[in-house]
Amino acid sequence: MSETESNSGWISIYRSIRYHWIWQDPVKLKWWIDILLAVNHEDKKVNIGMRLIECKRGQTVMSLRNWADRWKVSKDTTRNFFELLKKDKMIITENLINTTRLTVCNYDVYQGDLRTSQTSTEREPNESQTQADPNNKGDNGNKREKPYPIPKNDIKEKIKKKESELKESIEPFIPIYGKDICNKFHLYWSEPNKSKTKLRYEMEKTWDVSRRLANWANRDKAFNTRINGTGAEPNYQKL
């Protein structure tokens, strides 16, 4: 690949990459973007010694030593980084004679609607894509941005945090309405949606704990009155 080719073109980087673990480490993030920029955007054959090696779209052929020299780190550091990416199913590597073939998983995600048959003048990024050109300021009005995969652990932690916040907002009302009513209220409104990304109370247009609890307590009182207060109570989890 010529220097002109390697410095041309673009990839899509979506804002939601900020939710990915690699965003937390500037060095690893730089290496990851370098990989995305290094792989082919179309199928090619690479000559290594006296052999021709298939290098398809989303792949690159380069030895571990070359990657290490490129990033000015040891081979072990490079190998460990690749293993980290492989565990998260971001890349696949194949050990070949004197080199390594690296494949970026789901490469098309980083190319958007790019068609390899287009000429270089036709390869204009659509509004859901970001140019690799460092002078590009991007479009903050982007409305068709594709989501970057958010790790499941991050989603679970956010749900737990929201559930804990709801619990803390209810606790001051326990002396007023009692633990039983507050527990029922908490269990109902902390139920997650089908995708496990939001709690029930987050999907309400308006939310005021004191007003909601007052209405809940009134309905609960009316219900207990109808059954004369003799109904068996479920074994609710305590706040």
Image (cartoon, rainbow, N blue to C red):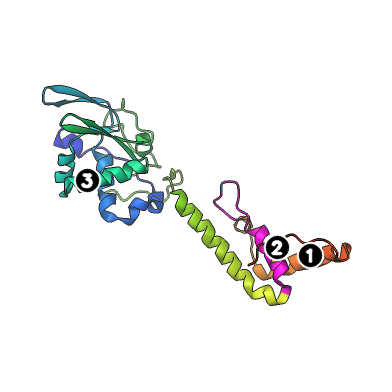
Residue projecting furthest to the bottom: 175
Find disc 3 in the rendering and name its residue.
Answer: 78
**10 Å crowding of disc 1: few (<14), some (14-19), many (20+):** some
- Tell me the quarter of the image containing the C terminus: bottom right
Give the CA separation, mark 2 to mark 1: 10 Å
Q: Nearer the viewer, mark 2 or mark 1?
A: 2
Give the CA separation, mark 3 to mark 2: 53 Å
Q: Between residue 232 and residue 163, name the one nearer to us.
A: 232
**Mark closest to the chain's N terminus, 3 or 2:** 3
Find disc 2 in the rendering and name its residue.
Answer: 184
The magenta span reads 177-199
The residue at the point 20 percent across, 46 percent down is: 76
Can you tell which quarter of the image residue 210 is in? bottom right
Q: Is residue 11 magenta?
A: no
**10 Å crowding of disc 3: few (<14), some (14-19), many (20+):** many
Figure check: 80 above or below 167:
above
- Percent across and percent down for residue 151 are 43, 49
Figure check: 142 above or below 42:
below
The residue at the point 58 percent across, 70 percent down is: 168
Q: Between residue 137 and residue 73, name the one nearer to us.
A: 73
Label pair 3/2, CB-CB below 8 angstroms: no
Q: Horizontally, is 10 left or right of 230 in the view? A: left
Q: What amino acid is found at the position of numbered circle 2 in the picture?
A: Lys
Can you tell which quarter of the image residue 44 is in? top left
- Percent across and percent down for residue 189 are 65, 59
Give the CA separation, mark 1 to mark 3: 62 Å
**Mark closest to the chain's N terminus, 1 or 3:** 3
Label pair 2/1, CB-CB below 8 angstroms: yes
Q: What amino acid is found at the position of numbered circle 3 in the picture?
A: Thr
**Mark closest to the chain's N terminus, 2 or 1:** 2
Mark linked to residue 220: 1
Q: What amino acid is found at the position of numbered circle 1 in the picture?
A: Asp
